[in-house]
Amino acid sequence: MEKETREIPEIIIDEQFKALLPALDEQTYAALEASLLENGCMHPLVVWNGVLIDGHNRYEICTKHEIPFAVVEKKFASRDAALIWIITTQVARRNLTPIQLSYFRGLHYRADRRIVTNEAGRNQHEQKHEVGPQNVDQPKNPKTVQRLAGEYNVSHMTITRDAQMSEAIDAIGEKSSEAKREILSGSAQITRQRLQELAAGGTEDEIRAVAESIEAGTYERPKRAASDPFAGDVMGALNAALAKMADEFDTVIQRVAKEVEAAQLKTALRGHIAKLEDLYNRL
């Protein structure tokens, strides 16, 4: 539900929401500015509870040149619901780089998992609007990952890894917004594998060191001996091997699922899960 208004309310800039928009290059920004100066702001800005959620570049230019603009107010029940709307809008509208798309998928998954279902069975989209973050423990829906995998046409393992990667990027962003911008733009030479390692067990000092080195332009990928994939970055090599195995296993499972009953497949999987748990417990 949305409502357009020409009476401009006070607009709040949320830095997290603003950071989700890939920065325009100088040429594109100049072209947008010239168009707005010549034609005016033809498309309304979108706000939620006064918070700008779409149209940050237009808002900046219009404010600078005192160009009138309209506003559309959208209704969301929570910050996470608004965040998901921003993500899906950006994914549908822009040509994102692979790292940006992975980051958005990971954010979408994390926000979706935080959606609260109350005791009456209503979800947060039906509840009171709020701008601030929610700090409520929420039940986790095991089907979320499968649903998002279908929406984005990727495997559920990809969604899980994207979530880990987005956590690491956000953690780096807390230490240096510039480092985060460089990662998302593709300028930083940090690998997905390294980001997943930081998300899985990176210390505050490690994350700070990575953020500072990226911002300073001194970050270098860990080097490995060609003859030994486990030389140097042992955990990196292990994580890479596990990730590759998981992808291959996921492909096989999807194929087998078309040929056998779900109950039979789950029984087979449960046996191997038990073996992995035994290995885990023996470490």
Image (cartoon, helix red, strand yellow):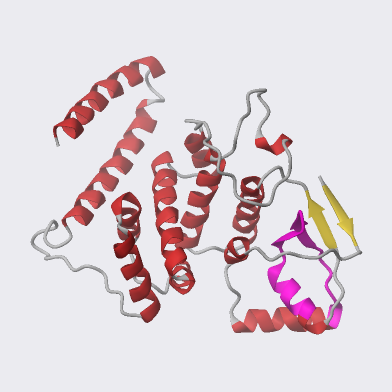
Is residue 16 something that shows in the picture? yes
The x and y percentages for residue 201 are 29, 51
Is residue 152 something that shows in the picture? no
The x and y percentages for residue 195 are 35, 58
For the record, the magenta segment spans: 38-63
The x and y percentages for residue 41 are 83, 72
Query: Which of 67 and 283 lies nearest the eye of the viewer?
Result: 283
* Magenta span includes 229: no
- Which residue is at a point 23% across and 29% down the rendered structure image? 277
Query: Which of 128 and 87 lies nearest the eye of the viewer?
Result: 128
The x and y percentages for residue 213 are 33, 75
In the image, farthest residue toward the left: 227
Q: Report the side of 202 relative to 35 (left or right).
A: left
Query: Which of 214 and 237 lies nearest the eye of the viewer?
Result: 214
Dividing the picture into quadrants, the one containing residue 223 is bottom left
Looking at the image, residue 269 lies above or below residue 40: above
The image shows a total of numbered marks equal to 0
Question: In the picture, which quadrant includes the N terminus?
Answer: top right
